[in-house]
Image (tube, helix red, strand yellow):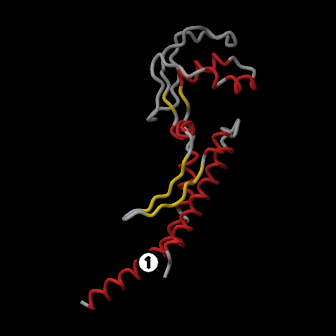
Amino acid sequence: MLTLKYLQQELNDFGNQVVSDARTNLASSGKVDTGQLQNSIKSTGAVFMKRSITLGISLSYYGAFVEKGVRGAGGVRKQTSTFNRRNNKGKIWKQKGKGSPYSFKEGVKPSVKHFIEWSNKRGLNPYAIRESVYRQGIEPTPFLTKAVEKNIKTMPMKLQEAFGLDVKSTVDFIIKSNFKK
């Protein structure tokens, strides 16, 4: 007979593997600059309640934005590019985060402080980067979704046996207790 402790350990191992794969996916996608997002992904463990099992994985708010993407405010470009010989004035910004539950509201731009370090490393103007992110949005990078989908294929076999044996012992107990009455 399998114990609750065994089931909890199996689910915790699954959660730790998902977190490990999510961090690997994030690193391979090139989204790791400071490592803060990568370090914010944690497995909070399995919790057994009356009629449900919960496995918690926590990450920062920015992690949710990276996972789902952010819709840009859109709009029209107001000036020409000094680096591009063709005139791109009046062209509509390309939207990146379509279908995302998150979006930038018109007139509320993100703070420049979030882009200073990144833009200085690349020799770009942080105000131009802020404007671009505000107008275009952030493209989704499903690092956590891919990790869960990859690991969910291996989890059911481990836990199917565990729940199968647990269900069998529960059915045996119910049958024995009903026959006594």
Q: Which residue is mark 1?
A: 166
In terms of depth relative to the viewer, which is nearer, 94 or 142?
A: 142
Outermost bottom residue: 180
Q: Is residue 90 left or right of residue 21?
A: left
Picture quarter with the C terminus:
bottom left
Return the x and y of residue 157 as percentages of the image width and height.
52, 71
Return the x and y of residue 106 as percentages of the image width and height.
45, 18
Outermost left residue: 181
Residue 45's image quarter? bottom right
In terms of depth relative to the viewer, which is nearer, 95 or 69?
A: 69
Label 1: how many Cα within 10 Å (few below 14, some 14–19, many 20+): some
Q: How many marks?
A: 1
Secondary structure beneath dot 1 equals helix
In terms of depth relative to the viewer, which is nearer, 174 or 149?
A: 174
Q: Residue at x 55, y 31 (%)?
A: 138
Return the x and y of residue 118 as percentages of the image width and height.
70, 27
Return the x and y of residue 66 as percentages of the image width and height.
56, 37
Q: Residue at x 67, y 49 (%)?
A: 24
Q: Residue at x 56, y 68 (%)?
A: 9
Task: Judge whether 66 appears above or below 137 on screen.
Answer: below
Task: Judge whether 53 appears above or below 114 on screen.
Answer: below
Residue type at numbered disc 1 = Asp
Task: Judge whether 52 appears above or below 176 on screen.
Answer: above
Task: Judge whether 111 appears above or below 181 on screen.
Answer: above
In terms of depth relative to the viewer, which is nearer, 160 or 179?
A: 179
Residue 116's image quarter? top right
